[in-house]
Amino acid sequence: MTEQEKEISQSPETAEPVEETTAEVSELQQAKEQLVVLQAELEEQKDRYLRLQADYDNYRRRTQKEKSELSIQVTQDLIADLLPVVDNFERALAATGQDADSIRAGVEMVNRQFVSILEQNGLEAINTENDAQFDPNFHQAVMREENTDKPDGTILQELQKGYMVKGKTIRPSMVKVSFQ
């Protein structure tokens, strides 16, 4: 090696790039290791997300199935409760040669039985007693009549009964309401 080559190889200018190269390699190695760690964490989070999504889908299907089964069970129970009413109507229709009073008494008994079963299952009649106030949540005004004796919005007559099941209106009462 010539002296000039020795000076170049030992000069501080060439020594720094070698050190920088070693530092860059070290930083690059650390970045690669960090990348591997982050990729592993990402895969773990992705797996957790997919498991959670699958659990949610299973929960949704299970609750939908349970809801459907519950609805079927409620319907079956109600129909089973109503079958004796059907039996009594069939007996009344099969009875021939009886007078009108006994047929009427039988139909009234069947009606009471039917209403009783419905009440046991949560049916309630909506209040439309005389002088009750009109409430659009429970009543449907189909007629209005001028009446100076009663306050505005007083129910004068019930035209069709309304019903609620466990506090929820399923059919509002059709009523005639006063106005002044």
Image (cartoon, rainbow, N blue to C red):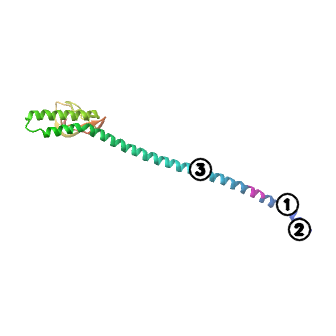
Picture quadrant where residue 161 is located: top left
- Residue 62, position in %: x, y? 43, 45
Tell how many labels. 3
> CA separation, marks 2 and 3?
55 Å
- Describe residue 149's horizontal placement relative to residue 18 as left or right: left
Closest to the observer, 127 or 109 = 109
- Quadrant in the picture for the C terminus: top left
Based on the picture, tell me whether residue 24 belongs to the magenta stretch: yes
Under circle 1, the secondary element is: helix
Three-letter residue code for mark 3: Glu
- Residue 112, position in %: x, y? 20, 32
Observer able to see residue 156: no
Under circle 2, the secondary element is: helix
The residue identified by callout 3 is 44
> CA separation, marks 3 and 1?
48 Å
- Quadrant in the picture for the N terminus: bottom right
Q: Is residue 166 above or below residue 47?
A: above
Q: Which mark is residue 12?
A: 1
Whichever of callouts 2 and 3 sits on the residue coming sooner in the sequence is 2
- Residue 140, position in %: x, y? 23, 40
Residue drawn at x 27%, y 40% as measured from the top left: 79
- Dominant secondary-structure state across the stretch colored magenta: helix
Three-letter residue code for mark 1: Pro
The residue identified by callout 2 is 5
